[in-house]
Structures are given as structure tokens and as C-alpha cells.
Amino acid sequence: MTAISVDNLCKTFRGRKALNDVSLKIEPGEMVALIGASGSGKSTLIRHVAGLVTSDTGASRIVVNGRIMQENGRLSGNAQHLRREIGVIFQQFNLVGRLSVMSNVLVGLLSRLPGWRGNLGLFGRDHKLTAMRALTRVGINEMALQRASTLSGGQQQRAAIARTLVQGAQLILADEPIASLDPASAKRVMETLSSINEQDGITVVVSLHQVEYARRFCPRTIALADGKIAFDGPSEHLTTEFLRGIYGEASEELILPDAPVRGTRPAPVPDLREPVFAGA
Ligand SMILES: Nc1ncnc2c1ncn2[C@@H]1O[C@H](COP(=O)(O)OP(=O)(O)OP(=O)(O)O)[C@@H](O)[C@H]1O
Ligand SMILES: [Mg+2]
């Protein structure tokens, strides 16, 4: 069963196509990077797969875990149920700052509990143990009782990942989870995503601005340009020259500062068996 199947997805905002006939398939257990310059459609694609927005009417279809999420511009009857199986992570962490880290992670359980228990005060010891295990998994168990607002950006993002683990998500859609982090924190967050992908078999789709992280952590990359898929294949093919071929001048936005400045000699093609990783 395919984890994500997108067919002929189009989305128009104010007369302009943000997604233009996008089709792709992602198998369970894959870790896929979604790259593209600003405005290329990464967030729009993620939001469609998550069932947060609907496509243009037409022959489009998005199937998640074998069930239709939306079709021809309408959410299916499964959408609400399917959303609970998807962990969505945003650049801005989306934690409640005044609540403890533990409480924020317990929120992930709400979708799994019957309605009457949907209150943070009613979580039992087992639930808290589950949350602690998830926090240990992402390496911030010692911060469980701190207010979320007192954590660094990278720690908050790992708390957000712990919340998706507690939610029981088999699919994580992360929209630029490292965009506002320093290189060391960004690396930790990518390592955390990579570890839950490898060890728990959770499918991860992560949008990234910097292609070095795609090359290092994601075997496959889908590159969007102007709402279309410009490349879908092994991340190791994404050399500086290749990106320049797809994006032209805009490729500089996707390459870390070790890329050559315009007009200078091109950088050597990195040895892809040992990818160069700035900030590691
Ligand atoms: N709600 C909206 N209303 C109008 N236009 C939108 C809306 N959401 C996205 N767009 C437009 O759709 C296009 C794709 O936007 P999207 O946010 O998906 O790009 P992105 O690749 O995520 O960019 P970034 O790297 O800056 O996050 C852009 O031209 C954007 O202005
Ligand atoms: Mg975006």
C-alpha cells in the first residue's frame, strides 16, 4: 500500500497556479525531501496531502495510507480520520508556550482518546509514561516539566516530533522544520527525523530550503519549480550544477554558502559518498 499517492494535483490562487499537475508516489518507510525556491509550492503540496486545503476541481486525487484524502477538489469522508494518522510539523513549532513540554506532547494523544477525556487534566500515568518515552526518544526527557517557551528552537521542534510519535502517526509531513534553527540544532532535528524513519519505519516527507540537508538525510528528493515537479530521484544527483540547471540563478537560494559566488570558478562536484555538510 502506497503511503502517499498524488495524481494530477492543481491548485490556483488568484489566477496563478501554485501547483500545476503534480503527480507522485511515496512508499511506506521512505524519507523524502521536498525542495524548491520560495513560492515553488512546497507548503501548498504538504497542506493538500495533510487534508488542510482542497485542490482545484478536476481530475485530481490524493490517497494516504490507501484511503482517499481528497478527490476533485473535495475532502473525502475519511479525511478527518486520516488526519489523525498524519503528524504535521511546521517551522514555527506550534507548541503552547505556557504549557509544559509534557502537556504539549500529551496533546498528541487527544486524537486517540474518546471525547470525554479530551482534557489535559485527565491523562493517566500510562499516558504520561508514553509521553516520557517519546521525549526520551527525541532526547529532551529532562525538560519534560519545563514550560515549552523556555526551550530552544531545536528542542521545541523535537518536542513537536515527540507529539507526533505519541499521536501514533505513521506519516510525518514536516514543512521546513529547520528553517529557523542554527546549523547544530537543525542537524539534531534532522537526525531525530531520520532515526524515527529508520527505526520505526515512519514515512517522512520534509520540505527544506537547503539541499545539503536533503543530500545528507534523505535518499530521495522531489524538487518543485513553479508548482511543477522538476526532479524526482536520488538526492545524490543534486549537485550544484544540476540544481543550477533546474533553477538557474534561483539555485543559490538552495545551496549553502560553500557554493560559488556568481561569476567565480564553479565549486568541485562534492564526493557524494561523503557528502559535504556545512555546519556539521
Ligand atoms: N493562501 C494563499 N493565498 C494566495 N496565494 C497563496 C496562498 N498560499 C500560497 N500561495 C501562493 O502559492 C505559491 C506557492 O506557495 P507556497 O507557500 O506553497 O510556496 P513554498 O514553496 O512553500 O515557499 P516558501 O519556501 O517561501 O515557504 C506562492 O506563489 C504563494 O504566494
Ligand atoms: Mg513554504
Image (spheres, grey):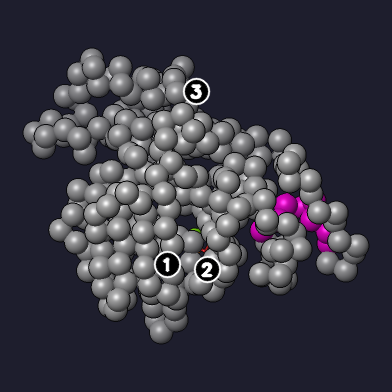
Q: Which class describes the residues within 10 Å of circle 3: few (<14), some (14-19), or many (20+)?
A: some
Residue 169 visible, this orientation: yes
At x 59%, y 41%, the residue is 217
State left or right for residue 261 relative to residue 125: right
Q: Main secondary structure of the magenta part?
A: loop
Disc 1, SS: strand
* Distance of label 1 from label 3 (alpha carbons): 36 Å
Residue 181 in the image: state x and y as whole percent: 59, 42
Q: Identify the residue position indicated by label 3 in the image.
A: 139
Q: Identify the residue position indicated by label 1 in the image.
A: 23
Q: Are marks 2 and 1 in contact (CB under 8 Å)?
A: yes
Q: Please state the total of marks drawn on the protein image.
A: 3
Q: Identify the magenta region.
A: 254-261
Residue 16 in the image: state x and y as whole percent: 44, 81
Is 52 in front, or is 121? 52
At x 20%, y 52%, the residue is 80
Instruction: Give the amino acid at mark 2.
Output: Ile
Instruction: Give the amino acid at mark 3.
Output: Gly
